[in-house]
Image (cartoon, helix red, strand yellow):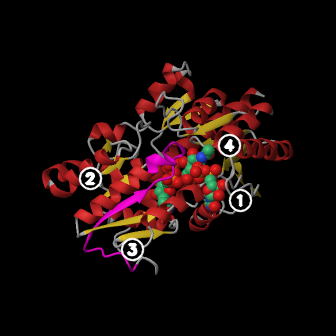
């Protein structure tokens, strides 16, 4: 029985990684027509993920512009989605997380009165400017959504506290764990390009890109890294630098050419995940890394003042350290010199899922479409 058409929309690297397992599961269901739409809010960083997971989009809005701002992405997605939605008339639009693509695509679907499913629903810091604009993007998407796929119990509780009815929420785990388990394997060998890294040394894996860290906060982060590398001769920094020129230019200015600093192009997900699994610890302001690194048993120092992912903090493998240079230096130094402290944080814990999140999501989508047919 034909159940209907599901349109999966995403635009950035992390959304693509986390939606890839859902697309794979959806495509296994013959009774569902799946359409993949990429806004291409990111270009190269998105294409890396599409290639790895063999996803060929049905629509590519090709929106990315260098140094784009929130207005241009939001209106570009909103207008671009209008034509696609009118032509395709999907029964459900699936969005992920908290980017401008997420919110604008959900709004576009709402304007056509098409129900929205929100994957990775219910994450909250309750500080509307941190992370910015993600906290508001996901809260607004939550208001628009009909189906809420919450990764954890805590995320479900956040939605219940906002009066989302419990029968519209499913705790599924986070699809990032599906993607990670699909990718990491013991016999992996790195492709050419990472030879300069000495894996006999302790590798600090660093990523940073958040808007609220642009400028002096990022300078502080980089200064702390310089202090650490100067103090510990067996420490190297591997930093795949985000394509955003604001991040890229500052990283080059402060860290370029320094001994034991490896400023890399954004890595494909496969080498990146293995680099994470072979690192000593992770310092990051990313959201996704806070979910992946704990399952690989890597301590994470989060370079932010707030986190919407407190589960691994509670489990003891993630610590929120902020962006003050001295604090970052002290916390990282402690993990470099105190092995008891390090071992306490380096436990593999997995509060974010068991690798079956996409299956659970697709099961509920089938149920939703089935009931919908019955109600016509
Ligand atoms: C976006 C999301 C953020 C998410 C992050 C993941 C918004 C507002 N921000 O932030 O929530 O955590 O992606 O990485 O939705 N660029 C390239 N090539 C690429 C990607 C980006 O050159 O493949 C450059 C472009 O100059 C672009 C700029 O980076 O204008 C910023 O991209 P944008 O998507 O606006 O913001 P991010 O900081 O990547
Ligand atoms: N990632 C990657 N290559 C890199 C850096 C990160 O594939 O060079 C992956 C990482 O494993 C995670 C995701 O990209 O799954 C995180 O993306 P990002 O930090 O851009 O966004 P956020 O998670 O903060 O939204």
Q: Distance between the residues labelled 4 and 3?
A: 38 Å
Does residue 173 sit above or below 332 in this rendering? Answer: above
Residue 214 part of the magenta segment: yes
Spot occupied by residue 69 in the image (x, y as percentages of width and height)? 68, 46
Which residues are drawn in magenta?
Answer: 195-218
Residue 289 part of the magenta segment: no
Q: How far apart are marks 3 and 2 (CA)?
A: 28 Å
**Badge 3 or badge 2: first in the primary sequence:** 3
Q: Distance between the residues labelled 1 and 4?
A: 24 Å
Q: Mark 3 points at which residue?
A: 188
Check disc 2: other Cα within 10 Å, few if <14, some if 14-19, many if 20+. many
The kind of secondary structure element at disc 3 is: loop
**Badge 2 or badge 4: first in the primary sequence:** 4
Q: In which quarter of the image is the C terminus?
A: top right
Could you say which disc has been placed on residue 332 in the image?
2
Is residue 310 shown to the viewer in this render? yes
- Is there CB contact under 8 Å for labels 1 and 3? no
Q: Identify which residue, 47 or 322, lies in the foreground.
A: 322
The kind of secondary structure element at disc 2 is: helix
**Badge 1 or badge 3: first in the primary sequence:** 1
Q: Name the residue under label 1.
A: 57
Q: Name the residue under label 4.
A: 70
Check disc 4: other Cα within 10 Å, few if <14, some if 14-19, many if 20+. few
Does residue 105 sit above or below 271 in this rendering? Answer: above
Q: Identify which residue, 299 or 17, lies in the foreground.
A: 299
Q: How far apart are marks 1 and 3 (CA)?
A: 28 Å
Q: Which of marks 4 and 3 is in front?
A: 4
Image side of residue 9 versus residue 247, left or right? right
């Amino acid at each position: 029985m034909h159940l209907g058409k599901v349109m999966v929309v995403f635009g950035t690297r992390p959304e693509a990684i986390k939606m890839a397992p859902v697309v794979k599961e959806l495509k296994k269901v013959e009774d569902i027509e799946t359409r993949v739409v990429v806004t291409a809010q990111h270009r190269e960083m998105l294409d890396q993920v599409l290639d790895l997971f063999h996803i060929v989009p049905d629509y590519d809005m090709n929106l990315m512009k260098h140094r784009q701002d929130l207005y241009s992405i939001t209106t570009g997605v909103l207008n671009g989605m209008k034509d696609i939605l009118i032509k395709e008339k999907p029964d459900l639009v699936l969005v992920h997380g908290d980017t401008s693509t997420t919110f604008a695509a959900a709004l576009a679907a709402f304007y056509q009165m098409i129900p929205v499913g929100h994957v990775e629903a219910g994450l909250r810091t309750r500080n509307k400017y941190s992370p910015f604009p993600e906290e508001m993007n996901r809260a607004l998407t939550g208001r628009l959504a009909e189906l809420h796929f919450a990764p954890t119990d805590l995320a479900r509780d956040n939605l219940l506290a906002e009066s989302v009815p419990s029968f519209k929420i499913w705790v599924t785990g986070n699809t990032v764990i599906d993607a990670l388990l699909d990718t990491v394997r013991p016999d992996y060998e790195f492709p050419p390009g990472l030879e300069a890294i000495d894996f006999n040394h302790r590798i600090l894996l660093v990523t940073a890109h958040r808007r609220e860290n642009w400028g002096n906060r990022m300078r502080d982060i980089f200064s702390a890294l310089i202090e650490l590398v100067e103090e510990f001769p067996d420490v190297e920094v591997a930093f795949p630098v985000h394509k955003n020129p604001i991040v890229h230019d500052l990283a080059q200015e402060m860290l370029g050419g320094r001994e034991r600093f490896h400023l890399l192009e954004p890595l494909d997900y496969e080498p990146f995940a293995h680099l994470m699994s072979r690192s000593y610890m992770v310092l990051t302001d990313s959201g996704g890394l806070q979910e992946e690194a704990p399952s690989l048993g890597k301590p994470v120092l989060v370079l932010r003042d707030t986190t919407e992912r407190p589960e691994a903090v509670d489990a003891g493998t993630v610590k929120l350290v902020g962006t003050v240079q001295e604090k970052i230096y002290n916390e990282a130094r402690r993990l470099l010199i105190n092995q008891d402290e390090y071992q306490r944080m380096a436990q593999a814990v997995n509060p974010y899922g068991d690798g079956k999140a996409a299956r659970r999501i697709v099961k509920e989508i089938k149920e939703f479409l089935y009931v919908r047919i019955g109600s016509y």
